[in-house]
Amino acid sequence: MAIAKNTYELTYIVNSVLSEEQIKDLVERVTVYIKEGGSDILDVDVWGSRRLAYPIQKKRNGFYVNMYFRAPGAFIGRLERALEIDDNILRYLTLKLDAKMVRHFEAQKSQRAEAPAAETTEDNG
């Protein structure tokens, strides 16, 4: 019997003191960990370095990453524990999406996919 998977949104802030290569490796490591946990990655959106609303561990800037994935509910506890242990991840937030939020995410994703196609058509026309 297949395990029911819920859709989640994970946003985490990486220490911006790290080099670009270290940040890239950390994002890849988190993505691989999620895949190995039996999850399906839907989207990874790297927002980049931004100023924090308030200092975290005496740091003013952080590197933001936002991702959407489908995972069994039991996996989220292990994921959050792994994020908590990593000293280079300053904060994280995991949200379980309800049906309305999933529809909104899928609508946004289809709009983003259609936008480049429309620009290409306008440039050729």
Image (spheres, rainbow, N blue to C red):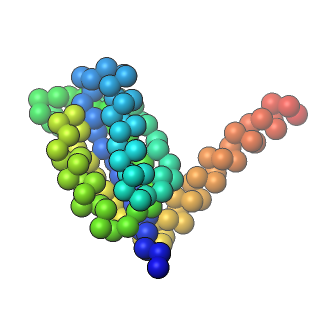
The answer to whether residue 67 shows anywhere in this view is yes
The answer to whether 86 is drawn above or below residue 68 in the figure is above
Q: Give the total of numbered labels.
A: 0
The answer to whether 42 is drawn above or below residue 12 in the figure is below
Q: Nearer the viewer, residue 106 or 35?
A: 35
Q: Residue at x 75, y 42 (%)?
A: 118
Give the percent coordinates (x, y) of residue 20: 36, 22
Q: In the visual, does 31 lie left or right of 92? A: right
Q: In the visual, does 50 lie left or right of 59? A: right
Q: Residue at x 11, y 33 (%)?
A: 57
Q: Residue furthest top?
A: 19
Displayed quadrant of residue 37: bottom left
The answer to whether residue 90 shows anywhere in this view is no
Q: Nearer the viewer, residue 102 or 22?
A: 22
Give the percent coordinates (x, y) of residue 124: 85, 31
In the rendered view of the protein, which quadrant contains the C terminus? top right
Q: In the visual, does 86 lie left or right of 70? A: left
Q: Nearer the viewer, residue 94 or 37?
A: 37
Q: Residue furthest bottom?
A: 1
Q: Residue at x 29, y 61 (%)?
A: 76
Q: Residue furthest left?
A: 58
Give the percent coordinates (x, y) of residue 117: 74, 42
The answer to whether 125 is drawn above or below residue 70 in the figure is above
Displayed quadrant of residue 122: top right
Q: Residue furthest front?
A: 1
Q: In the visual, does 42 lie left or right of 49? A: right
